[in-house]
Amino acid sequence: MMFSSRLFKLEFTRSLKSLITWSLSIGLTMVFVIVLYPMVIDIYSAIPAEYQAFLDAFGGVPHNVVEYYATEGVMMLQLFGGIFAALEGYNALNRDDKEKTVECIYQLPYSRTAILTTKLVKVIVNVLVFSIVVYFMSILSFLVIGESYDGGDFLLFNVYNTIMFLMLAILGFVLVVFMKPTQKSMGAIAFPFVFYIISVISSVTNNETLELLKHVTPFTFANPVDILKLGADFEWISFVVFTGLSILLTVAAYWRFQKREFTV
Amino acid sequence: MRLLYAISITSLKKYYGKTRGLENASLDVKEGEIYGFVGPNGSGKTTLTRILLGLIHSTSGEAKIFDQDVTKASVLLNRQIGYLPSEAFFFPEMKVKDVFRFFQEMRKVDDSRIVELVKRFDIDMNKTMDQLSFGNKKKVGIVVALLHNPKLLVLDEPTTGLDPLMQQIFLDLLVEEKKKGVTVFLSSHILSEVEKVCDRVALIRDGIIYQVFEMNDIAQLENKKVSLFPSLEGELPDGMTFLKEEDGLSHYSYIGDINSLLKRLSGQTFEKCNIRDASLEEIFIQYYQKEGATNDVL
């Protein structure tokens, strides 16, 4: 058996409180940002011209609610959502080490592959639930303030964004397999930040070499301004690099996990 | 016909980097026996039990359970093994009954055995795991190890944390399991429990298995402890060793025919005289203290 539905149920139930907290917190933050739109729309026209250039580096002045969402709201969604996804992946395995439940889980008549797969599926489901909750809370907010928006682009962005979260979750998941069991979860919090900063640097710079950095961060192919405002072409290189990396690291993690020593 | 062993270990070695966990260990546990694995803390007992469970991998050598390599058949074997770790950790926020339900569903067994064991060990099912004392967590661990009626029980320091009454209930349970044909591999540093239930016992120290005893052989060793006042005059008889002066008595150990000893003692008048069988603990301490024991690796 490659999957245990009973173990999945246990893992999912145990992570439910954290999932609800993160989903509602980020979802409500998005609601808060979106419902403020009618109140802040006039502020943009009052911004002096010399600051407009600075704003351009971060998406420029929004002309509708979705552009406003892309320039003002998504930063928090991507940053905190990225941390949630990375922690979700990291804690799926690390929690057993931390709570010393390793011996009780791995004495069960299930292969390590089955246990790893079950935990990975739980991580994927949690990230999907998180994304869906935040997506629908955002849509609800658009409806509440009565602003029209392009549902297709908005859905497309959220699909890319969810894929990016899944990649960050997989990186967090894989990280644990290659680290010592006693390691703290700071690493999982740090790497979404690093990727985000790389994406900001590559987008604000005029240096051609630094611009190439955009290919080594998954935030590039889920760039909200490109998708929701500029309608730019899809960033295939960044997508392919991180899809390949995720697949490669997942395969390596399955191989490495067979050799892992449970000494808690 | 070849004897089928529940556990068969050959030249098993485990190093953690340069630190020795287990050195060239070999032993066989027969089906249906209770086998004690005795040694001080840090001697390698847990290392061996974890290798048997597939939690860690040996550096070299072979470990088999029911004639199957533990590294290749761990899923199949884990169906037949009940394991109690030295510290039983479960999901802290879960109620005991939910922990049992989880393991019951994972093992695909009904709850009749759980009901019986819960009653026997007087477990409060409505408390959460983090509300339980160390001993009560251990009782939960015992139920989890036994709920699927395993053919082999691997128990690491099973009675640590249990009160004397629960220890006795647990040891009685082991004897009952043995009568049903269950094999028990009991790792412990508490010799009194080993003495009560084990058929054979292996001694381990610093990762090295020194000796394997049949408990019947130990009983026949005629190893005695003798306490006298005043002390024995003249040369000590063969097999007698002076140990110490304590509480106004001279203490000796004696290995040999009891009648020869009595004959020798009858030649002198004593105010106090006590002769008793040495406990397993005293025999093992004597053994561990013996110089050159390292040359006697099995």
Image: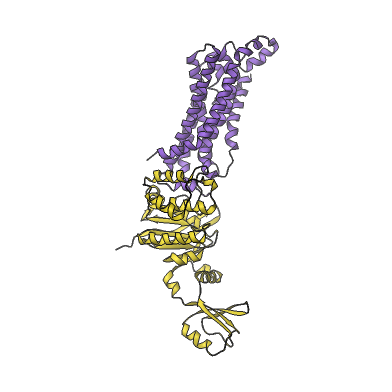
- On-image quarter of the N terminus of chain A: top left
Q: Residue at x 70, y 12 (%)?
A: A50
User: Is the residue B153 above or below the residue B94 in the image?
Assistant: below
Residue B30 in which image quadrant: bottom left
Residue B298 visible somewhere in the drawing: no
Can the viewer see residue B235 in this picture?
yes
Question: Toward the viewer: B259 or A159?
Answer: B259
Give the residue at x 39% y 39%: A2
Q: Position of residue B64 (x, y in %)?
A: 39, 55
Q: In this view, does A159 lie above or below B131?
A: above
Q: Position of residue A83 (x, y in %)?
A: 57, 31
Q: Which chain is yellow?
A: B
Q: Residue at x 67, y 16 (%)?
A: A54
- Residue B166 percent coordinates (x, y): 48, 59
Residue at far left of view = B1
Which colour assignment does the render follow? by chain
Where residue B51 appears, as percent x and y from the top left, is 46, 53
- Which color is chain A depicted in? purple
In the image, residue B158 above or below residue A19:
below
